[in-house]
Amino acid sequence: MLVVKKFGGSSVANKERIFNVAKRCAEDYRNGNDVVVVLSAMGKTTDGLIAQAKEINPNPPKREMDMLLVTGEQMSVAYMAMAMASMGIPAVSLNAFQVAMHTSSAYTNARLKRIDTERIRNELDARKIVIVTGFQGVNRYDDFTTLGRGGSDTTAVALAAALHADSCEIYTDVEGVYTADPRIVPNARKMSEVTYDEMLEFASLGAKVLHNRSVEMAKKYGVQLVVRSSLNYAEGTVVKEETKMEKMIVSGVASDLNTARVSVIGVKDEPGIAFKLFHYLAAKNINIDIILQSVGRDGTKDISFTVPRTDLQETLEIIKEHKDVFTANSYESDEHVAKVSIIGAGMSSNPGVAAKMFEALYGADINIKMISTSEIRITVLIDENDVNRAMRAIHDKFDLGDD
Ligand code: ADP
Ligand code: ASP
Ligand code: MG
């Protein structure tokens, strides 16, 4: 068997945790399996590196940001190989160059395109555990890139696909995928299985337990995933194409603080304005989510939308620069907002789901600023201070919990 095992930052946060991971990998190795380990940076290392960079330059060049961030993962893999060596387990650490993990050129948000497997195969054939840096890649300029926050999950899935692994296990600090973030909703229930499509919604709507691109890739290449705890042996959650579980109307609740609202005010009520606005933003790779356009009045209208909070400054600069093209009188933004979403494949055929969600928010006296719906989810934008209360109120209303 060839197994790919990915361990997140909290699972390698200190010496004890590193040895805990080394031991779990050694078990597989001693059972005769080929073991590929993917690691994230230790604990909150990546956050620390970003904060330090911003002290030096509040708007650091993205290339240099990636050059910096890759060091976090490189520390983890080296320490892990040292830990394994001390246990008499042959192991080798490899970074994205050494593997070679080829990505698109977009610094800080690159996409994995191709992985060379020869070096890894050779090391496995030599009966070594191969420990690979998550989150990083190399682009066509021979520069380091990173895959976006939480991207180590994607490295693991991509490696599992490229190596035709027999299993891909994502180890983290919770026991699996829950009906809501168990740190916010204490009675959230662990799901034994979840489909790729539902998991993709969860991940895209803020449940950072899996990086959304990792789920996209798992679906594309048919890689079945298991999400489980690195700290115990509890059964985790299987992420796959079909589940035998009865489809729930609503399967869970997710929240996302990485969002900000932008309003472009007083644009001309004529064809092409939305196109121009979103075209400029798309050209800078800025993801727009909820969009709301007001009814035209006196020949003008307002367009509001949400962007990742991390892209707000860049968005505002683009609007400022092209204000005349967009025919805007003014613009404003609010970054103290958050998205809360419900997800469920059974939603489209069940009227009244939205009303029930809004009733839960009303009951908790929480104001809705924007709404967006699709067949499989409903998202509201609310004040960021209301997020945890909103999650619990909605989770309770749909009776998703354990008790
Ligand atoms: P890692 O460092 O292992 O990649 P992350 O912090 O990226 O871990 O992801 C795990 C965290 O995801 C959990 O600690 C939990 O707070 C959060 N989370 C959010 N939504 C969910 C959910 N629906 N189920 C499980 N965990 C969730
Ligand atoms: N270390 C990176 C981050 O913190 C990647 C990851 O953890 O998956 O975002
Ligand atoms: Mg993660």
Image (cartoon, rainbow, N blue to C red):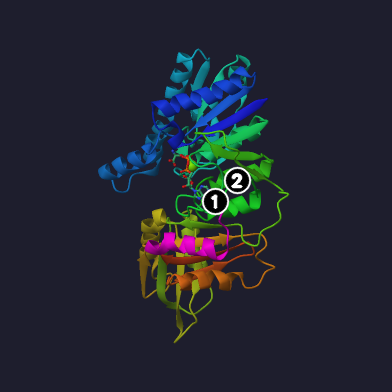
Residue that appears at 38% across and 69% down: 323
- Disc 1 residue crowd, few under 14, some 14–19, many 20+, Cα 10 Å: many
Residue 168: in magenta span: no
Residue 279 place in picture, x, y as percent: 50, 62
Q: Where is mark 2, residue-wise? A: 215
The C terminus lies in which quarter of the figure? bottom right
Residue range of the region highlighted in magenta in the rendering: 384-403
Kind of residue at badge 2: Val
- Report helix, strand or loop for mark 2: helix
Residue that appears at 61% across and 69% down: 353
Residue 220 place in picture, x, y as percent: 67, 44
| Image position of 179 with respect to 63: above or below | below
Q: Which secondary structure class fits the magenta region best?
A: helix
| Image position of 123 with respect to 20: above or below | above
The N terminus lies in which quarter of the figure? top right
- Disc 2 residue crowd, few under 14, some 14–19, many 20+, Cα 10 Å: many
Res 103 seen here: no
Q: Where is mark 1, residue-wise? A: 203
Q: CA distance from mark 1 to mark 2?
A: 8 Å
Which badge, 1 or 2, is on the more N-terminal residue? 1
Residue that appears at 46% across and 84% down: 299
Residue 173 place in picture, x, y as percent: 48, 39
